[in-house]
Amino acid sequence: MSVTLYSFLMALLCSSAFVVLLVLFRRKNEFIYTFGTTSMLLLFAGFVIRLALPVEFPFVKEIGLFDGLYANVNSFLMKNLYYGISFIEILVVIWGIVSAILLIKLVVKHIGFTRAMLRLKNHITPQITECQKRIEAELHVKNVHIICSPHFEAPLCSGIMKLILLPEMDYSDEDLYYILKHEYTHLKNGDLYLKMLVEVFVAIFWWNPFVYLLRYNLSDVLEIKCDLSVVGKENREIKASYLQTILNMVKASLNNDKKDKKLRLTTAEFVNYSKEDSLTQRFKVVINYKPNRRKGILYFTGFIATMVLTLSVSYMFVLQPAHTVPQEEIDEGGAVEITPENTYILETEDGKYILISDNGIENEIDESFKDMLILDGFEIKEE
């Protein structure tokens, strides 16, 4: 088992496919009704596993792409630019430096956010305290700190320190109950830890546009999942009351003239009026959702099996560049198969590279082709 350039590129390709599927399924309400939101989280898990483990197993089948863009890009990446340093090595160094900076920034940002929230003057009321006790008894979640302040434009929670942040306003008992239950459900489900994991992937793979697409859509999936956890099994009247609370918070946020755009790291907002399409989808899914436990388990089991099979198949082959043998050489019988077992690379004293096969055939190759063969397992010897 090893990690090569080609196995890494395969990991990028397959993980990106999981993100595309997540985006497509997230937009289909019928998929949510049938397979549930947890199925989309499985696609997220597939993305994480495939990108975090870009390994190449001994049984992998190598599929060559002949005379195409893939081969040209590979040759360019392997080309030495300065004192034996290849272009891809320069890219890796840049990648590592930027990722380290972004990860440090992420930690500092989170610490700063938490400290800023805890320093705020807390305007918590007896109404909030009583509602908090009720929710904790229902969901069995403890050690949650609620902060009520005019600095917030909408209710939100932060999962690392278990903070729930409420705008200072007059709440009806019903609105406050649904708001706190929604945020407590986020904390109970560990949704904020998933968001933190995505932020880490964004910091590490900052150059990959698919991680930003994943972050945007995973947030919507978690909100829908939370909505269904709160009222998905309730009757239409209770769902309508819950959705009315969301509308009330949207109106309050739009009318709030004390908006403070503070750092918001790995938080989950009760409403986000800047994403109107997502808010509309939440309404449609909640009001039309009809749980069917037996059918849901059947479809979900099938989805898990499909995911495991897809993930396994993605490790069974790898794409890599190949070179087409000229037809005249084939006609003359000059084409032979070279493998790491019957061929090695000889580095001469004057810096040239000779490909030597057991059958006595010797061919001089350039440095980029030499680097590609070494990645494929060919041995290099010095003269």
Image (tube, rainbow, N blue to C red):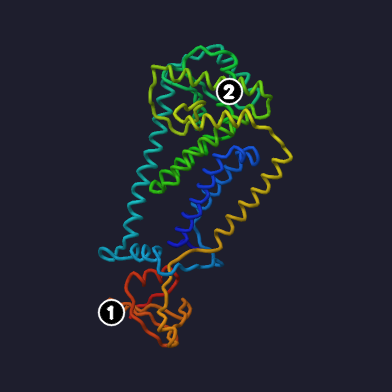
Relative height, residue 101 to residue 66 (above, below): above
Mark 2 or 1, which is nearer the eye? 2
Q: Position of residue 354 (x, y in %)?
A: 34, 80
Instruction: In this rendered view, identify the residue nearer to me: 72 or 59.
Output: 72
Q: Which residue is mark 1?
A: 349
The quarter holding residue 66 reads bottom left
Q: Position of residue 339 (x, y in %)?
A: 47, 77
| In-image side of 44 versus 374 (left or right) | right
Relative height, residue 189 to residue 42 (above, below): above
- Kind of residue indicated by mark 2: Leu
Q: Residues within 10 Å of mark 1 (few under 14, many from 20)?
A: few
Q: Which residue is mark 2?
A: 243
Q: Position of residue 104 (x, y in %)?
A: 37, 40
- Kind of residue indicated by mark 1: Glu
Q: Residue at x 47, y 28 (%)?
A: 272
Give residue 143's mark.
Answer: none
- Per the model, the C-alpha gap separating discs 2 and 1 is 77 Å
Helix, strand or loop at disc 2? Answer: helix
Q: Residue at x 47, y 40 (%)?
A: 215
Instruction: In this rendered view, identify the residue nearer to me: 291 or 196.
Output: 291
Q: Residue at x 49, y 63 (%)?
A: 2
